[in-house]
Amino acid sequence: MKVDVFELLRHANAGDTEAQYLLGEYYFLGVDGAPNYTEAYKWLRKAAGQGNEHAQASLGDMYFRGVGAESDYEEAVKWYKKAAEHPHCDYGCLRYGFCLMHGIGCKRDVYKGFKYLLKAERSEPEANVHLAECYINGLGTRPNPQRAFECSKKALDEELPGSWSLLGFCYMNGFGVEQDKDKAFSIYKAGVEEGDMQAMYDYGICFLKGDGTEQNFTEAFRQFSTPAEAGHAGAQFALGNMYENGCGVRKNYKTAASWYKKAADQGLPEAICNLAEMYLYGQGVSKDVDLGLKMLYEAKNAGAKKAADALRDFGADPDRKGI
């Protein structure tokens, strides 16, 4: 459908906020040519400032993604919140709820985030991905296997990123559905074929553990490699572990430490813990006891299960907050 941009401009200049919003989207998407982010920002800002909830959500996206505006998560959240306060802006609820769940640009509040995601579920399919995670992990609500399965299935019906892993998890663990590891494996495989990074990681875990398929360390290593290179912290940790233990690949402490560091830099507690131990014993890195102990306490405080035992093994007090 051809957009009558001159008509939109006429109404936008007359103060029509809906026309301003549509004009902003027209420029942002580059409907009749290359995107013009400067014009997109100008018109979306005008409409958002006058209370147009759809423009507020779109302006939030520009700040969140750093497209057409300097990246600013706090500013993004401000506009998402304004949009979410309108009774029918489900997309605003989705984005505001997501930020609250992860503490992006605001203080983390999983209970409040969950409530906004529930509102978004009315018309935003992506909400099912985040809600499934909430129901699986008990974030903002009690674990609910049946709802987790339902939301995961709805998300996969839309082929949303992460949905293969969520539904695969339900089948792999009998969470809200009868356990079927073979089906879980096939779901992960379908996700891999669609290029989903989380599915690649979970598919690799299947080969690593022999769940739904024959155990195959070489294949596990191969499956972890793509998401690890793309920045998936779990896959980076898995590769570090395989290099450290010579599992599916020749043992190489230096390479193991390198992969652990990549995952640790993203805040993965288990990676921080393993890298800390390498510093304590000088495996793959220059020995640095002070740094190793500091990282172990950091890992323990972040929830790494084996960090306390590692501290005890080194003669340190695991009940201290740090050094």
Image (cartoon, rainbow, N blue to C red):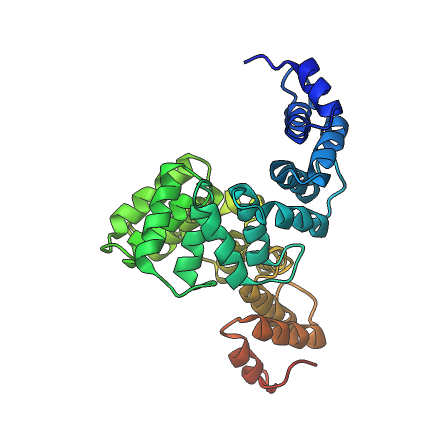
**Relative vertical location of residue 312 with respect to residue 153 in this rendering, above or below:** below
Tally of numbered discs: 0
Q: Which of 13 and 291 is in front in this view?
A: 13
Q: Which residue lies furthest to the left in this view?
A: 178
Q: Does residue 146 appear to the left or right of 289 in the view shown?
A: left
| Residue 125 point in image, percent of width and height | 44, 41
- Give residue 133's quadrant in the image: bottom left
Q: Which of 84 and 186 is in front in this view?
A: 84
Tell me if residue 216 can be seen: no
Tell me if residue 160 can be seen: yes
**Relative vertical location of residue 218 with respect to residue 270 in this rendering, above or below:** above
Residue at 47% x, 49% y: name it: 119
Q: Does residue 311 appear to the left or right of 73 in the view shown?
A: left
**Relative vertical location of residue 11 with respect to residue 300 in this rendering, above or below:** above
Residue at 67% x, 44% y: name it: 64
| Residue 146 point in image, percent of width and height | 30, 56
Q: Which of 171 and 31 is in front in this view?
A: 31
| Residue 138 point in image, percent of width and height | 43, 64
- Give residue 302's quadrant in the image: bottom right
**Quadrant, the N terminus:** top right
Residue at 73% x, 30% y: name it: 43
| Residue 247 point in image, percent of width and height | 44, 57
**Quadrant, the C terminus:** bottom right
Q: Does residue 16 appear to the left or right of 192 in the view shown?
A: right
